[in-house]
Amino acid sequence: MSETLPQSLSLPETVAFLESAFPQMAAGGKTYHLVEVGPGLARMRMDHHERHLRPGGTVSGPSMMALADYALYAAILASLGPVALAVTTSLTFNFLRKPGPSGLIGTARLLKLGKRLAVGEVHITGPEGGPLVCHATGTYAIPPAR
């Protein structure tokens, strides 16, 4: 990416905002953890938990979708600041490999951060890295400044 993206929120500030704006993400026990933010970047860990598994012992698609959406939203927040009303307008997923019953890491990178839209991608891997299990792209609408 040729443009330099801003960083408005630190990791602790981004975590605090996510926890206050989305307490439902910790319902039943917190399993999504933001572990890094930077200009146009967020890395989130999804812990292994029975509720993320589907029959056959693999991580469910909806759990990976939540990880990608949440990580990409965190990258936008860290870059723009606390914009609670930024909303997902599209998400596309390519499930590449069947992940085993373990936690996952979602690394989100913003490809474009405009005044009205943000576009990014998320690479989801196992907890120790390795091959991609899922690749996601997303677009988010950013509300006008007031």
Image (cartoon, helix red, strand yellow):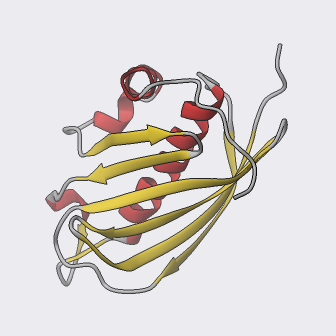
Rendered residue at 55%/68% (across/down): 136
Residue at the (23%, 38%) spot, across then down: 30
| Nearer-the-camera pick, 130 or 84 | 130
Say above or below: 71 vs 90.
above
Quarter location, residue 27: top left
Q: Is residue 86 left or right of residue 13?
A: right
Q: Position of residue 2 (x, y in %)?
A: 74, 55
Query: Looking at this view, is 75 or 101 the one in front?
Result: 75
Q: Residue at x 29, y 51 (%)?
A: 45
Q: Is residue 107 left or right of residue 88?
A: left
1 above or below 145?
below
Provide residue 62's location: percent of width, then percent of height: 41, 64
Q: Residue at x 45, y 22 (%)?
A: 17
In the rendered structure, the answer to whether residue 28 lies left or right of residue 22 reads left
Q: Position of residue 128 (x, y in %)?
A: 21, 68
Q: Nearer the viewer, residue 78 or 46?
A: 78
Q: Quadrant of the N terminus?
A: bottom right
Where's residue 20, x and y in %? 41, 19
